[in-house]
Structure formats: structure tokens, C-alpha cells
């Protein structure tokens, strides 16, 4: 019993430590994302993309890069630009970029995994887009694309956020009312991810404290030996198991990053960890939403497209990084033994950005209550899954509180 209580205390402390380490990164990422959503509206994106395929892919990738990292927002944005006339491949580029190339994800990966994984994430996101483009050109599913466009109906949920704005962003950025909109977007960003982040970071702490290395060595063949010397079949197995593991957590990529760091620290291959991070678009909730938008045939085609691109990108990254001797030593990624609460740059950054968050809340919800603000369109979530995730988050808070009480009061 004492061993369990000790592990419980360490699991809770580790989870809270993970979140404290990453807090400033979340705040920076979501403030930037909120600013971009206010000052670069979706309507302006649609107008800029045009019809030229090469240009639209580049712009789709860029607009995805500056968008929100929430998968459900990305799915809705993809549907919106596709319905407005963007090509299918540029819409896929937007979808992949908005879930793999976003700023906040790169910051979080740098904290937990290091610069090599940040480079891998951004190069991998570009590879995902290029492989998807190549597959679409080879398969050329014209009839499927035409049918998908017909399945899209004008549901009236797409808000024109550019209404009332002039074209001079320099004057727009000086207006207090627009910063109040940024504050409300910022609150919305947190409302979209709090459950995923809570559950993800709690699972990471539990995994670090309770799950033995033998489990990972069984799940990922030949892992746990502190080596990057894997056979092709072993790497392929890691790449396939990675998305399955991501699916079983039921959380998005932002909440999965501490788990990805744990996996790498346990000896999972670089390719397997990258596949785990890339997997937020090949899970059942995304499949169901795409089916609702475009029909089941197109949804399954998108699943095939993204999973094939994921495998290809992970393999290319692994062998490319291995050739350049850039794959980090797994022993260097040992986040569970760190002193997360010492007085260092993380402490001061967290205090500074918590103060900025406080000011934004004051501005958007107290000082400028008069500002009109339309919510961004979101993909239709499963009410059952959302309810499960909400109660799971509440259970996590009870677990964390209990563990911290054991650590600091009882023990």
C-alpha cells in the first residue's frame, strides 16, 4: 500500500511538473494563434488562395502554419476553404499544416524533446503535404472530389470575421477593441484544449510512475535498449503501433507531447515517436467528422492518404536523420527526473505570461464587454466522447489533488 501511495504522489507531482514546464509555451502559442485569427481572417485566406494549384498549396500550408492547433478547428477550416473553391490538395495541405506546423506545437516539442524533434516535426509536416500531393496526383480521384463538394451544404456556421475591418492591419492592430477580440479568442483556445491537456499530462505522469519498461519493450519491438540501431521491420512496427497508442489516449497532439517524450526515453525509435506525434488526424473522431462533411468514401480515402503519408514521412525522417547522425540519444530525454519547479527561466516566463493572460482576461471580459465577437466554426464533436473526456478531466483533478496531498501533507 505504501508503495502505491508513493507512486501516486510521484505521478501527480510529475504531471503538475510537466504542465508547469510547458505553461509559458501554451500561453505564447495561443496568444499568437489568437492574434492571427483576429487579424488574418479565414475570409482573407480564402480570397488569397485563388485557383492556381502550386500557389494554393503554398498558401494553404502557410495559412495552416499560422492557424490554431486544435484538430476540430482545423477540420472546420479545411471544410470551409474547400467549400469556397480551394483545390482538394490545397485543403489537405491546410489541414496537415494546421495540425503539424503550428507555432505552439513546435515550442512544446522543443521543451520536452529537443531541437531535433522540432526540426523533424516541421520537416515531417512538409513531407506529409508533399506525399499527400503526390498520392493525389497519382490516384487522381476526380469523381470522389466532385461528390465530396456536392455533399457539402451551406450550414450557415461560417462567420465572416472580416466584417467591419479595413485592409490596413497596422491600424487594426492599434485598436483596443481588436485586442479584446484577441482575448476572447485566447479564452476559446483554452476552452478547446483544457480537457485534452489535463488528461494527457495526467496520463503522462501515471505512465512515468506506474508503467514498467517491460510494457514498452513488449509493445514496441526491440525498444528499451538505449540504441537507435533498429531493423527496417522494427521501425515499421513502431510507426504502425505509434498511431494506435495515440488513438488509445483519446487526446490531441498538444496533450500527447509529454507521452511522446516518455516513449523516446523508454527506447522507442525516432520514427515511432514521430508517427505518434503525427497521428492526431488518423483517429476515429476525425474519420467520423470527415464522413459527416464529405461522405464515407472520401473520409476513408483521406484516412488512407494521411496514414500512407504518415508512414512515408516517418521512415524518411528516421533514415535521413540517422544518415546525418542527428537522432538524439534517448538517455538525454529523461523528463521525469527533472526538477520542474526550480527558479529558472521557466519560472519567470510563466509568471510573466500568467500576468499577460490576466490582463487579456480583464480586457476581453471586463473592460470591453461591448465588443462583438463571433466564435470560430468548429467541427461537430461527438457529444459522448466530449462528455467522457470532461468527466475524465474532473477525475484527473481529483487524482492530482489526492497525489499532491499525499506528497506534501501525509508523507
Image: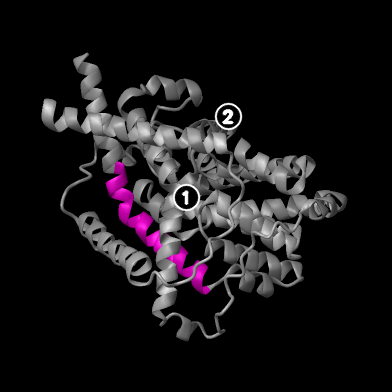
Front-most of residues 395 and 313? 395
User: Disc 2 marks which residue?
Assistant: 237
Residue 126 position in % (x across, y down): 60, 57
Q: Nearer the viewer, residue 349 or 238?
A: 349
Q: Nearer the viewer, residue 341 or 128?
A: 341
The answer to whether residue 151 is left or right of residue 96 is right
Question: What span is in magenta?
Answer: 18-39
Can residue 14 be seen in the rendering of this structure?
A: yes
Assess whether residue 245 is covered by the magenta stretch: no
Q: Could you tell me if the residues under marks 1 and 2 are in contact, i.e. CB atoms within 8 Å?
A: no
**Picture coordinates of residue 114 (x, y %)?**
37, 50
Image mark count: 2
Q: Is residue 101 left or right of residue 352?
A: right
Q: Is residue 238 visible?
A: no
Its colouring scheme is one colour
Residue at horizontal 69 percent and vertical 45 percent from the top: 290
Which of the marked residues, 1 or 2, is nearer the chain's N terminus? 1
Quarter containing the C terminus: top left
User: In the structure shown, which secondary structural element does the residue marked by tag 1 occupy?
Assistant: helix
* Residue depth check, mark 1 versus mark 2: number of the one nearer the observer: 1
User: How crowded is the residue under tag 1: few (<14 C-alpha within 10 Å), some, or many (20+)?
Assistant: some
Residue drawn at point x = 15 percent, y = 53 percent: 343
Helix, strand or loop for disc 2: helix
Residue 111 percent coordinates (x, y): 34, 51
Q: Residues within 10 Å of mark 2 (few under 14, many from 20)?
A: some
Q: CA distance from mark 1 to mark 2?
A: 32 Å
User: What is the number of the mark on residue 192?
Assistant: 1
Q: Quadrant of residue 382?
A: top right
The quarter of the picture where residue 214 lies is: top left
Amino acid at each position: 500500500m505504501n508503495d502505491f501511495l508513493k507512486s501516486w504522489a510521484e505521478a501527480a507531482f510529475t504531471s503538475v511538473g510537466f504542465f508547469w514546464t510547458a505553461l509559458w509555451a501554451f500561453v505564447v502559442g495561443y496568444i499568437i494563434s489568437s492574434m492571427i485569427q483576429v487579424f488574418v481572417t479565414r475570409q482573407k485566406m480564402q480570397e488569397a488562395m485563388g485557383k492556381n494549384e502550386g500557389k494554393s498549396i503554398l498558401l494553404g500550408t502557410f495559412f495552416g502554419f499560422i492557424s490554431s492547433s486544435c484538430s476540430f478547428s482545423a477540420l472546420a477550416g479545411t471544410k470551409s476553404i474547400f467549400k469556397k473553391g480551394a483545390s482538394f490538395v490545397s485543403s489537405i495541405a491546410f489541414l496537415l499544416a494546421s495540425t503539424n506546423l503550428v507555432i505552439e506545437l513546435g515550442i512544446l516539442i522543443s521543451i520536452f524533446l529537443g531541437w531535433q524533434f522540432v526540426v523533424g516535426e516541421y520537416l515531417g509536416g512538409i513531407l506529409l503535404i508533399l506525399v499527400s500531393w503526390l498520392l493525389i496526383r497519382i490516384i487522381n480521384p476526380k469523381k470522389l472530389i466532385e461528390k465530396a463538394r456536392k455533399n457539402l451544404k451551406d450550414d450557415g456556421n461560417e462567420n465572416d470575421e472580416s466584417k467591419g475591418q479595413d485592409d490596413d492591419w497596422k491600424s487594426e492592430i492599434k485598436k483596443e477593441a481588436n485586442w479584446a477580440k484577441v482575448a476572447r479568442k485566447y479564452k476559446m483556445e483554452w476552452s478547446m484544449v483544457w480537457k485534452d491537456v489535463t488528461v494527457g499530462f495526467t496520463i503522462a505522469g501515471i505512465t512515468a510512475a506506474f508503467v514498467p519498461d517491460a510494457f514498452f519493450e513488449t509493445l514496441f519491438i526491440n525498444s528499451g535498449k538505449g540504441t537507435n540501431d533498429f531493423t527496417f521491420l522494427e521501425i515499421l512496427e513502431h510507426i504502425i503501433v505509434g498511431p494506435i497508442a495515440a488513438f488509445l489516449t483519446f487526446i490531441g497532439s498538444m496533450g500527447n507531447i509529454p507521452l511522446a517524450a516518455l516513449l523516446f526515453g523508454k527506447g522507442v525509435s525516432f520514427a515511432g515517436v514521430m508517427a505518434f506525434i503525427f497521428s492526431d488526424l488518423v483517429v476515429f473522431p476525425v474519420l467520423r467528422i470527415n464522413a459527416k462533411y464529405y461522405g464515407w468514401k472520401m473520409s476513408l480515402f483521406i484516412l488512407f492518404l494521411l496514414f500512407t503519408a504518415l508512414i512515408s514521412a516517418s521512415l524518411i525522417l528516421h533514415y535521413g536523420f540517422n544518415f546525418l547522425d542527428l537522432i538524439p540519444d534517448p538517455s538525454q530525454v529523461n523528463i521525469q527526473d527533472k526538477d520542474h519547479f526550480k527558479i529558472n527561466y521557466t519560472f519567470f516566463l510563466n509568471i510573466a505570461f500568467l500576468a499577460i493572460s490576466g490582463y487579456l482576461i480583464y480586457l476581453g471580459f471586463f473592460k470591453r464587454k461591448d465588443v462583438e465577437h463571433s466564435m470560430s466554426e468548429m467541427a461537430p464533436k461527438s457529444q459522448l466522447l466530449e462528455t467522457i473526456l470532461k468527466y475524465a478531466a474532473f477525475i484527473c483533478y481529483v487524482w492530482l489533488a489526492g497525489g499532491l496531498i499525499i506528497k506534501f501533507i501525509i508523507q
